[in-house]
Image (cartoon, rainbow, N blue to C red):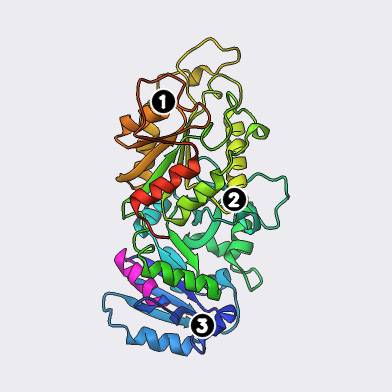
Amino acid sequence: MKQAVILAGGKGTRLKERLGELPKPLIRIGDRPLLGHHLALCERYGFSDIVLLLGHGAERIQRYVNEQQQPELKLRCIVEPQLLGTAGAVIAARQLLAERFLVLYGDLMIRMDLDRLWRAHEAMRADATLVVHPNDHPYDSDLVEVDKEGWVCAFHTKPHPPDLFYQNLVNAAVYVVDRNALESFAALPMPLDFGKDLFPLMLRKGCRLLGYRTPEYIKDIGTPDRYDRVCAEFDKGVIARSALDHPQPAVFLDRDGTLNEEVGGVTKPDQLRLLPGVAEAVRMLNHHGIRVVVVTNQPVVAKGFCTEADIEMIHRKLETLLGREHAFVDRIYYCPHHPERGFPGERPDLKIECECRKPKPGLIRLAMKELNIDPNVSWVIGDSTVDIATARNSGLPSILVRTGHKGLDGRQPVEADVAFDSLLEAARYVVEKIGRQP
């Protein structure tokens, strides 16, 4: 029996004009209260043992819980005698908790594939797994840094230095936690918050924290504007189709010459400059629920012109520049290989015939598997014939943008299905074709 802990003790002060006298978890979204959506999500993925940690409005929440006709769910309510914080409340209740449990916040609207999350935690044998995702305002958000395997290696609290290039990854406040990992922190002074206090301390103590990256729907309803937006997105079906057990539409974007200026190989961050209109194009795709995935050949690594760490910093700059204009990419995949030898300082281990170098479809196939991409409503956009051939080899329609190489590289004997002068025009075309409403 899998267990979920729902933190449902917040006052909802900023949402008072919408709540009236209701506790925040009982505010209505669509056909039921927010807490009802949490219970339905847990039931859908087999989390049948549910512990609710309550504070403000506990009596009304308990009454709602007692009225539920869900015999397959075991529901228990615990009322905090004092303010303990998110982590403090869980630690105080640890004797009632399973060896491994899910943590959900009662003021978030969530629609995600919890099975995928649970399996990832088990496979990596983490002490705790934090769901992380990009957002459209990373510059004023607390950020999480993960390594290439997904392990959390740093937390960056706001405000951020103006010259910092960062991964656009935010703690989404959905966790899987192993109870044993909490024992050594039980004596800490309260209140104790997961994001600000416990997780940074666990990291310093050498605990294994996994960052589970997902583009799925996890949004705070804590202000009137945010609540209204969530309600509108629920009514339009945006939330229902956002989970990774639902096939996703996507745009696969080339990098150099499509997103940023073509300079003959970007080897350091100061060479990366966004093309005009790119952030607006990406923001439009984000707004319409279309996954934005970068797939790029970076043979500069195999040739010895730069390292994987350099590529990471270049991609951090890309994410930072997009984030400053309220746009984000859902994932970046790159191929570091190159088959030809003879470059001074080259990397012999990367001089191979691989399956991920475009125009081979390896990167796109990996992305389609990891993000459950629907090929019937997805596109490849790039500035070269290599990108067009990649689309063809992946069974996807192609769009040429007349930036960068402008399709004049002559490397592949192919023609695009359609061409536009800019990524912004291409994005408008995709949105119109897919027919997604924001």
Residue at 39 percent of width and 46 percent of height: 430
Residue at 51 percent of width and 51 percent of height: 283
Q: CA distance from mark 3 to mark 2?
A: 30 Å
Mark 3 highlights which residue?
18
The earlier-in-sequence mark between 3 and 2 is 3
| Front label number (2 vs 1) | 1
Kindly check if marks 3 and 1 are in contact, taking CB atoms under 8 A apart as contact: no
Residue 26: x percent and y percent? 44, 82
Mark 1 highlights which residue?
385
Mark 2 highlights which residue?
323
Which amino acid is tagged 2?
Gly
For label 1, count other residues whose C-alpha is less than 10 Å away and answer few (under 14), some (14-19) or many (20+). many
Q: Tell me if residue 227 comes above or below residue 312 in the rendering.
A: below
| Quadrant including the N terminus | bottom left
Q: Name the chief secondary structure element in magenta.
A: helix
Residue 195: x percent and y percent? 59, 62
Residue 46 magenta: yes
| Residue 274 position by quadrant | top right
Residue 205 visible here: no
Residue 47: x percent and y percent? 34, 67
Q: CA distance from mark 2 to mark 1?
A: 29 Å
Residue at 37 percent of width and 66 percent of height: 236
Circle 3 — which element?
helix
| Front residue of 105 and 253 | 253
For label 3, count other residues whose C-alpha is less than 10 Å away and answer few (under 14), some (14-19) or many (20+). some
What span is colored magenta in the figure? Answer: 35-48
